[in-house]
Amino acid sequence: MIEAGIYGLMAEYDTVPGLVAAAEQAHEQGYRRMDTYSPFPIEPAAEAIGFHKNRVALVVLLGGLLGGMGGYSLEYWVSVLAYPINVGGKPWHSWPAFIPVTFECTVLGAAISAFIGMLAMNGLPMPYHPVFNAPNFTAASKDKLFLCIEAADPQFDLTKTRQFLERTNPRIVTEVSN
Amino acid sequence: MATRGLSDLPPSQRPYLADPPVIAPGHTFASVTEKIMRTVLTGRTPLGWIGGVLIAFGIVNILMMAFGYLFWKGVGIWGITVPVGWGFAIVNFVWWIGIGHAGTLISAILLLLKQSWRTSINRAAEAMTLFAVMCAGMFPLVHTGRPWLACYWLFPIPLTMGVWPQFRSPLIWDVFAVSTYFTVSLLFWFTGLIPDLATLRDHAKYRITQTIYGVLAMGWRGSARHWARYETAYLLLAGLSTPLVLSVHTVVSWDFAVSVIPGWHTTIFPPYFVAGAIYSGFAMVLTLMIPIRAAYGMKDFITMRHLQNMAKVMLATGLIVAYGYFMEAFMAWYSGNRFELYTFKNRAFGPMGYFYWMLITCNIALPQLLWLRGFRNSPVLLWMMSIIVNTGMWLERFVIVVTSLHRDFLPSSWGTYKATRWDYATYIGTLGFFTMMFLLFIRVLPMISIFEVRALLPQSRINSLAQENLQ
């Protein structure tokens, strides 16, 4: 059930075990549209909300392959087709000499796709997001940990979800407006 | 018998074996955040910082004058001549780019090796890499004399002339290696900064700083899904940087080794260049970190453990470099090639022999003091050693470039080399540029990665006791 103007309910925690236990319970209760917010990476928190796999590695592999093939094709086109020059009798297609640049282009393609791919899959840059409306959310980049169950979750109910979150020993539970 | 009591204790409790901690005890998430953030978000700029930036900016102006005169007159203002066509520009290029390598080693290779002590020095070391590569990049650009006319043979750019770069030349490999290295180092550094920029955005007091850090943080909110992708991307960038950093100095050494000049044409060059790069880079990290940790009160995060570990890396890479020097001498004799043998003799006992012996003193003889525990425990002595090693590594590049070129195959074409005041002005100018960039960096960005230090605290783990036992 979606409440108008509400993004979700945000619970604040002090300790990592407290946050992870709450996230695990929420997942057991059947909540899926939720997220935790923390000032440092907590791998068990991602596991607890059911986020097990990401596709960054695949994007990086594709970017690296594209970079490498692009680099080699450029060298081949320049040295064999567009501007063939005889250097010390070496063949036009002198592939061993083309390896260093191919390698550098592979790394460049992979690194750029790691950066852009990670940001794009995270939906960044994002100038506005409702979670920043939560009180004390600036502590999410300092020393506090948050669990937000979103109103878009099919099981979300303002009173029931609030009761559930209060049972997980948070410091405070607050409504987050859209 | 007096030592029996001590050796019964577990190693971590023996007073003479215990390593100092990576982070001083008693810190919380809030205290590390406050402490590191304070140097950036404070309204009061230290007077020493202002003085340092002014001096460095003055030296940058020397660099600008040197470049201005160079573009006006051409490379004839330098000491390069026939037969020494490669002078200070190449020496400084190799020196600077080598210094950069320690930053990538600390941030990438030590991350993959799970060396958690790297955490509090990686941000500053990566910044050092970027600024060192900037300084390095200036030399190949300006040594063309007219850089704006040089782009078509450095980079593959479509022009009406239909002329393209020569991909069989190590010099072109170098262009690709160094520009890729700079780009990847920048991406890696910026990726590491994103969560800390969000911290600065959330705690900045003024609208303008909130906006600037907010735009740079791109809306980072610390979501678990974001952190998972972030960690994957960060690890992959580290994995990519590792072979990249090894390839960069390898390619730089090929600039020499692929030629036929005696003293350059050797297969020991790539590993020995890479080891030398890491050697000089760690020396530069010590040169920067020892004053900074004292001036900014960062001794809780940059502890004696860091200084000792860096000293040990210097000792190890210094020994690899010593092996490189020995192999050069051995191969000169074992090859049976009279030109190789003469080049070596000329290097050690010729008219510029004193440079060679200064280099051996700075790079091999004096650093053996690092074997002594007491020496590694003294920040002042380590700082002096770092200056000695940096000097030695500069001399190494000078000896390789100049003594190999000034007397090669034909005695009739022998010559000598003498740097001019413009050579020195350019070199000192880049030192000023490097210092200025580094000072600006520590004022506007957190010099220590805040989120990684938070993750280093025992509270960040779900079961801290179990984790402690695993380590």
Image: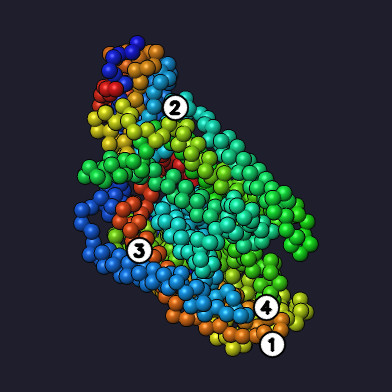
Observer-nearest of B279 and B138: B138
Q: Is residue A105 above or below residue B143?
A: above
Q: Residues within 10 Å of mark 1 (few under 14, many from 20)?
A: few
Q: Position of residue A69 (x, y in %)?
A: 66, 43
Q: Which residue is mark 3?
A: B436
Q: Residues within 10 Å of mark 2 (few under 14, many from 20)?
A: many
Q: List the single residue furthest toward the top.
A: A1
Gap in Å between the C-alphas at discs 2 and 3? 46 Å
- Left or right of B200? Residue B241 is right
Q: Residues within 10 Å of mark 4 (few under 14, many from 20)?
A: some
Three-letter amino acid code of the residue under disc 1: Ser
Observer-nearest of B110 and B441: B441
Please give the name of the residue rendered at 63% of the width and 41% of the height, measured from the top-left corner. A65
Q: Which residue is mark 2?
A: A48
Disc nearer the start of the sequence (4/3):
4
Q: Secondary structure at mark 4?
A: helix
Q: Is residue B457 above or below residue B265?
A: above
Q: Is residue B363 above or below residue B183?
A: below
Three-letter amino acid code of the residue under disc 3: Met
